[in-house]
Amino acid sequence: MTPFSRFWGVWGVHGGSPGGHGGSWDFHGGSWGGHGISMEGHGVVMEFPWRVMDGPWRVMGWSWGDHEVILKFKGKPGALIPVLEECQIIVGYLPVELQDYIGGRLNIPGSTIYGVVTFYSFFSMVPKGRNVIKVCLGTACYVRGTKQIMEKITSEFGISVGETTEDRRFSLEAVRCLGACGLAPVVVVNEDTHGGIKSNAMSEILSHYE
């Protein structure tokens, strides 16, 4: 059960009603504050995770109904993959809360969605940077210096493989082959392929990506 369904269930049972930018549970003396939700009167206090609504839900234009992305594909064969793709484009990643929402709207088990998200490498459950650096560690690239390139990026930006800089500028990924062995060593930044590069050239190359 997601935080939203728990919240909705308790709210409905206790006769809550929203209003304007806040809400109240008059009958049971509850209150909706700016940083969380609390319910009092029966010894129940529940802090609502605003970070969830302030993250994907704010960007997705959260409502209790279907988002336009859901409406676009709902009921169509193979709807899950394109819905996940578009949601990731909007939000930047696919946290479990968002997966639960998608599953509920498409009537697909959360375990199925989780399996799809973790199977395909282009889906991510953690926020990615504005620029994704992919360093090829295939044999041809590795023997020509991508190990040194990886070390250069790691030391300069303070991130390891699978991590993102604090300012969300870069995410670093290691891949086994980029299909450009003739250009080895190869680093791809977003859609740009950089071949035949040296580790000391990475700073200059990455300076063009903000």
Image (tube, rainbow, N blue to C red):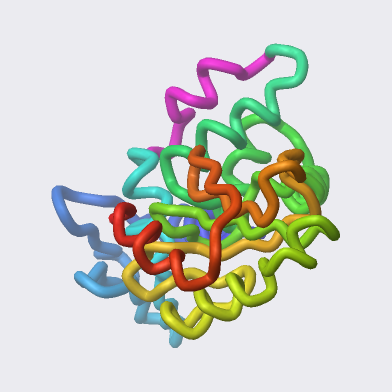
Specify the farthest residue to the left.
20
- Residue at point 55% right, 72% down? 163
First to last magenta residue range: 63-75
- Residue at point 39% right, 40% down? 60
Q: Is residue 13 visible?
A: no
Q: Nearer the viewer, residue 169 or 183?
A: 183
Q: Quadrant of the C terminus?
A: bottom left
**In the image, residue 66 lies in the stretch drawn in magenta:** yes
Report which quarter residue 42 is drawn in.
bottom left
Q: Give how far across and how far down residue 18 sits, in percent.
A: 26, 51
Specify the farthest residue to the top.
76
Q: Give how far across and how far down residue 175 sits, in percent.
A: 73, 56
Report which quarter residue 107 is drawn in.
top right
In-image side of 116 versus 134 (left or right): right
Q: Nearer the viewer, residue 51 or 20?
A: 51
| 88 up-or-down from 155: above or below | above
Q: Give how far across and how far down residue 131 sits, in percent.
A: 43, 53
- Residue at point 63% right, 62% down? 173
- Residue at point 67% right, 67% down? 146
| 45 up-or-down from 98: above or below | below
Q: Nearer the viewer, residue 167 or 203?
A: 203
In-image side of 27 versus 180 (left or right): left
**In the image, residue 169 lies in the stretch drawn in magenta:** no
Q: Is residue 61 visible?
A: yes
| 150 up-or-down from 119: above or below | below
| 34 up-or-down from 91: above or below | below
Q: Give how far across and how far down residue 61 sits, in percent.
A: 33, 39
